[in-house]
Image (tube, coloured by chain):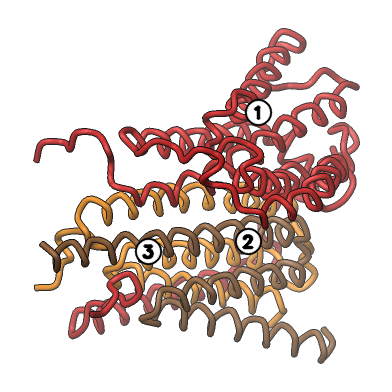
Chain colours: A orange, B brown, C red
Amino acid sequence: MTPPLLYALAGAGLFALGLHAFLIRRHLFWKVLAFNVMGSGVFLVLIGAPASPPGGGADPVPQALVLTGIVVAVSATALAIGLALRVAAKTGHPHLPEDADA
Amino acid sequence: MSPAGWTLDVALVTLILGLAWRLLWTRNLFEAVVLFVAFGLTLSLAWVRLGATDLALAEAAVGAGLTGALFMHARQRLAEKLAERAEEEVDG
Amino acid sequence: MRDPAVHGRPVRGVLGALLALAAAGLAGAIASAILTLPERPATLAGEVIATLDRSGVESPVTAVLLDFRAYDTLLEIAVLLAAVVAVWALERGAPPLPSPSEAADPVPGALARLVVPLAVLSGVYLTWAGAYRAGGAFQAGALVGGALVLLLAAGILPPRVRAVGRLRAAVVAALAVFIAAALAGLFATGRLLDYPPGAASRWIIAMESALALSIAAILADLFVDVPALAEPAAGPEDPR
């Protein structure tokens, strides 16, 4: 196992952790956090997997992809937080109406 | 693949997974945001280990710094707004 | 009373356990895909290195971002602009801005005097350095965006990016420059977004500077405007 492979596998784990939390947690802020964790997992896989065979080096194309991805993820996160704040301002609860406590 | 390098990589991966687990499952939003910033900075170190220095810079500045600060500020406004609403409901 | 902003309660029970199992299965599937990659996975790195001298920059990542895949960067800046427009749209009916004297706070002002000149200098350096080593427009934009946030918070600038005409212009600057470069490339070489031979490094520096400026304005705007969305709309409520 090479170090990049370790990171790539960690990325797979992060993706699953994030997905599970995204589905389970009701609080909209936590959904956004979970989505960010999923995104970071994907980025780790994108960078780690090509470098994982022995002798693989830093590949510029996935790096450019992930750099774009990080910046887009930030703006999408900002918009998502804005929407969550709007929902909370209108309904008084930080979660969607269908997720309200029974 | 030196032993020191390996130790560092294993430590970073453990930190990354541990921070993610903890931040996703805590009940305290403040703690989650703080852990998220730590998560982003640890991820930045991981990018350095993977040879992606551009990503390390961007992750530290934008992923951890900007997103973390934004979350912190938004959490504060959310807590204030919800506390106001609760007071209104009690006062009628 | 428990503060609902602080405590979030997850879904419990059988459904939670089933989802956990499904997520674990997904992780396993991704892991097995990673582990069964061929010995020499398909990569474009060789071609990037081979054509690097024609791209006008020395850093392979910058070459990919600003030359070989400049189209993706154009779309990316358009996405950032869309996010900002969406946030501005959410603010319709928001309460009026606080006047500068209300918002004045001495700490950001003092920090701004120290930090902003350094940040701008470092931002210019980072943008230029991206052509040769790690750096580039995104990182520089984030740095200068932070400086902009200080200026907005200190009351030195009006507290909304929208209110400052030059910052509004900065938000769209990169998209405008990229589209202009694409069209100019079309007239110069017959292909959209193709740089004239020999002029690539000048074009790239110009485009990267515009990109850094826009990213700074956009990130600063998002940082300042999004928390303000917690205010309920002051205008008439939508009928429900």
Q: Position of residue A17 (x, y in %)?
A: 42, 76
Front tag of 1 and 2: 2
Is the residue marked by circle 3 packed among few (<14), some (14-19), or many (20+) residues within 10 Å? many
Which of the image's four quarters has the N terminus of chain A? Answer: bottom right
The local secondary structure at tag 2 comes to helix
- Dividing the picture into quadrants, the one containing residue C161 is top right
Secondary structure under badge 3?
helix
- Distance from Cα at disc 3 to Cα at disc 2: 17 Å
Question: What is the three-letter code of the residue carrying label 1?
Answer: Ala
Q: Residue furthest front?
A: C101
Q: Is residue A14 above or below residue C112?
A: below
Q: CA gap, disc 1 to disc 3? A: 31 Å
Residue situated furthest top in the rendering: C187
Viewer-nearest residue: A32 or B85: B85
Question: Mark 1 to mark 2: distance in Å?
Answer: 23 Å
* Mark 1 vs mark 3: in front: 3
Could you tell me the amino acid type at mark 2? Answer: Gly
Residue C39: horizontal and vertical position, in percent?
69, 68
Secondary-structure class at tag 1: helix
Looking at the rendering, in which quadrant would you find the C terminus of chain A? Answer: bottom left
Residue positioned 74% across, 58% down in the render: B57
Please say if A94 is above or below C232. Answer: below
Q: Badge 1: how crowded within 10 Å, few (<14), some, or many (20+)?
A: many
| Residue picked out by circle 3 | A29
Q: Quadrant of residue C34?
A: bottom right
Q: Which residue is mark 1?
A: C174
Please give the label number shown on residue B65.
Answer: 2
Q: Position of residue C126 (x, y in %)?
A: 83, 46
Q: Mark 1 and mark 3 in contact? Answer it, CB < 8 Å.
A: no
